[in-house]
Amino acid sequence: MGTLSELVGKETIEKVLAKGRSTGAGFSEIFIEDKRSTSAGLDDGRIEQVTTGRDRGAGIRVVHGETTGFAHTADLSEAGLLQAAEAAAVAAKQGSGGVVTVALGGIDRHQVNDVQILPNEVPKTRKVELLERANEAARSIDQAVVQVSAGYGDSVRRILVANSEGVFAADDQVRTLFRVSVVASGDGGMQTGYDSMGRTIGFELFDLYDVEELAAGAARQAVTKLKARPAPSGALPVVIKRGSGGVLFHEACGHGLEADLVGKGASVYRGKVGEMVASSLVTLIDDGTMSGEWGAIGIDDEGHHSQKNTLIENGILTDYMWDYLRARKENHLQSGNGRRQSYMHLPMVRMTNTFVINGTSEPDDIVKATKNGVYVAKLGGGSVNTASGDFVFGMTEAYLIENGEITEPLREGNLIGNGPQVLRDIDMLGNDFAMGNPGTCGKDGQGVPVGDGQPTLRVKSLTIGGTAA
Amino acid sequence: MSSGNALQDLADRIVAQAKPGEQVEAYISRGGETSIRIYEGEVEHFVSAQSESVGIRVIKEGRTGYAYAGTLDESVLSEVFAEARDNVQFGSADEWAGLADPDGVEKVPQELWNEELAHFPTAEKIAIAKELEKLTLATDSRIRIDDANYDDAYGETAFATTSGIRAHGRENGCYVSVGTLADDGDETQTGFGFSVGRTPTDFNLARAAREAADRATRLLGATKPNSKRTTIVLDPYVTAQFLRVLSSSFSGENVQKGRSFFAERLGESVANPLVTLIDDPTNSLAYSATDIDGEGLAARRNVLIENGVLKEFLHSSYSARRGQTKSTGSAVRTGGTPGVSCLAMQLVPGTATQEELIAQVSDGVLIQMVQGLHSGVNPISGDFSTGASGLLITNGQVGAPIREFTIASTLQRMLQDVVAIGGDVDWLPMSANGMSLVINDVTMSGA
């Protein structure tokens, strides 16, 4: 396929940006996207189907005072784009202003991801084979495995962003993903196992990781849980395995450090920069430049270079995450966190790869130091109320800790805590950092790919939402 | 020719290109939305957008291929058809694969299009959202507004298959919502309120404002309760969310693939005899009412549980062929091959008000909000655990607010542990209705 700058010329973009400001608006922006995706699914022993998709269009944003007007179109002709620009301009303000001109320089690229094998150049047969290998590997683990579903997905997302302040930038974002879910059945009913892997790289993902191993792990998780006992009910120490609990930080504080929520007074972390908000063990980073990770981007969806931002340093809150609008409003620098799901969406402050860096404890010592508690080997999704700080996250693979040893498997459940309290309650941090599973973060109805990571750590008290006394 | 027919013509034209031995389905849609957000009396954003899409499914010798695109551009349409055809060769042969055949069931017409909304002036939409913000602020001095929103959307779809199904229709609707923050010292709690309609004149702004304020203020000063076994009374909104969690277990396809705890239990008691649960998208009171399912067959009323006894599983044409039964008109579009889902779940109500139900509870909790149903509930194993907030119930009276706790049981047990169903039916903007529901013997985990 042709590049976006071939599809929509610079002169057209300049005209569109000028049109966007024609009713007197101070800012106009065009975001063009061309995304091709392929997915294939296996279920019940069959390749259900291979799907290919194409989404292409432009979103035009116009900011007039405090009001943002936005329109999008799948029509990338000059006439189509000008019509959308006019709609956005009218949306931002009724009436007419003056004539504006916008001049752009050359296209800016900030490359952080390195793709070896473009997935759209790989025969579909090879993608389908991966699914069959995963199916066989999962089923060979145990007779109790009764159902396997596996999914392969890749996308090549090309974006071009230009605005009336001279930003003119492009990025190609290539992502490849694989997931397996397994059902095992035994005397006590059914249990499930799940695992996934995904990177912002091409088909070389499968040279780096083994789908059989991933599938076998998901199958073992399901089979192990057949013997699981009900999870405890109440507050206990919780040890979270490396690379499985980044979602804890994503929910406990990540969302609360997004400047749009802070600016509206909807975050427990408002007004807390410079204050101790976490255990001094905690240094939290959001890093869009982490090459190949699921949340890695060259530029954000407002054309700003991705950055490595320190949010919490040794327990002290150092900064929030910012997008264009919030940074402009508060006279702060953008941080490369302005992201959107697609050309049909407005950008807002979003995380990229959010992680806690290593501490010094040996992971084994953390378990040994815990007399009774819960060891979480795999977390599921989560959610947070940023204003109150209350958050939940699911544990999909967990074990009891008894007398400093990991013992019996537990059934699933949610854990609940309050963000600021849990951050202070982190009392041991391991030296075994790992990134976790690829995630999709939802906010205001939009999903974007995000990564997370942490070393093995302990929270001295979290409420486990099980049923056992 | 109306634009609806133009879409139908396009769908027909694609299907007419099917080659011998190919089954082809074309699904075309076109729509638009207006989204207005008000903050502190000003328009924060105004989104006006159109979108269109085409999906083409091709089945040959039992193998399925699918492709879609977010444009109806002619050059892309031929690419989509070619991709769908190319994808066929990679699917496994499946003897039950295929399109739905017309089954003669008559559609129950639904009024899904409102002409007034289609011509509703933009300035009045903005005024409605501003009014909602103002009304909400006026409810309580402790209330701040996170955002007040007006949203509307319209869509037209057309559908054609080589098996002879043709359907086109259009639908529109509108929605207002408000998010609130309530402050008391260092503490902040949040709430939300909403109202939906076919046209803005259906809105009840006063109720949306009051509920948004109540949800936030009633949690101020809430504490974390101690862990114990207790009785819960679910607010109608929470009951609807609970019903949604059960939905996938009624799917005939999930039963066939070993993903439903209801498998092998048809005709058995799976719930308290008080429970009668139906799926009825032909009931026009339901927010998700529709006249056709995702394969173009007439939507219909299906009884899932009657007086506690499991009566029926739901089917698409695929799961029906596989199970040697008939489609129940329950197909949903999830991409290529349609899935199976409840379309409009309705628990048959009792007669008591929420106050009367609470009066019967000596020691329990009124659950007003839940958090984390997606992460703590496993519809395959039935494990149920969710974050919650609400009010303590003591001797039939609601008391102090509590938060940061979970409620847990299993879905199987909770259905048996239902002890009362309220008469306070609320038709919520979800694919399930809501009413107060009392469930015994649930574990509350807190401090």
Image (cartoon, grey):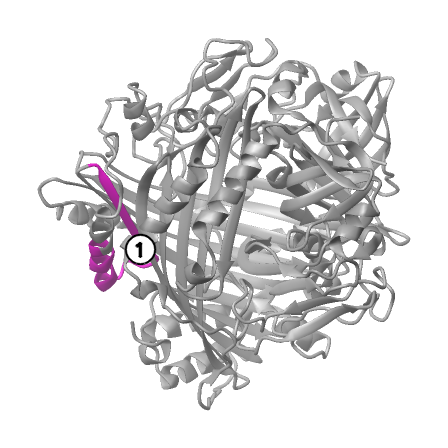
Residue appearing at x 79%, y 13% in the figure: B360
Q: Chain of mark 1?
A: A
Q: Is residue A380 above or below residue A285?
A: above
Q: Position of residue A32 (x, y in %)?
A: 42, 71
> What stretch of residues is rendered in magenta?
B62-82
SS type, badge 1: helix
Q: Quadrant of residue A322?
A: bottom right
Residue appearing at x 48%, y 32% in the figure: A142
Residue lying farthest right?
B185
Residue appearing at x 68%, y 79% in the figure: A333
Q: Is residue B421 above or below residue B47?
A: above
Q: Position of residue A197 (x, y in %)?
A: 50, 54
Q: Position of residue A267 (x, y in %)?
A: 76, 58
Residue type at mark 1?
Arg
Residue appearing at x 42%, y 79% in the figure: A16
Q: Quick one: B229 or A114, which is closer to the camera?
A: A114
The quadrant of the picture occupied by the C terminus of chain A is top right
Q: Quick one: A415 or A210, which is closer to the camera?
A: A210
User: Number of numbered discs present?
Assistant: 1
Residue B351 in the figure: left or right of residue B346: right
Q: Kindly identify which residue carries mark 1.
A: A126
Q: Position of residue A448 (x, y in %)?
A: 54, 59
Residue A5 in the figure: left or right of residue A143: left
- Residue B26 appears in the picture as rendered: no
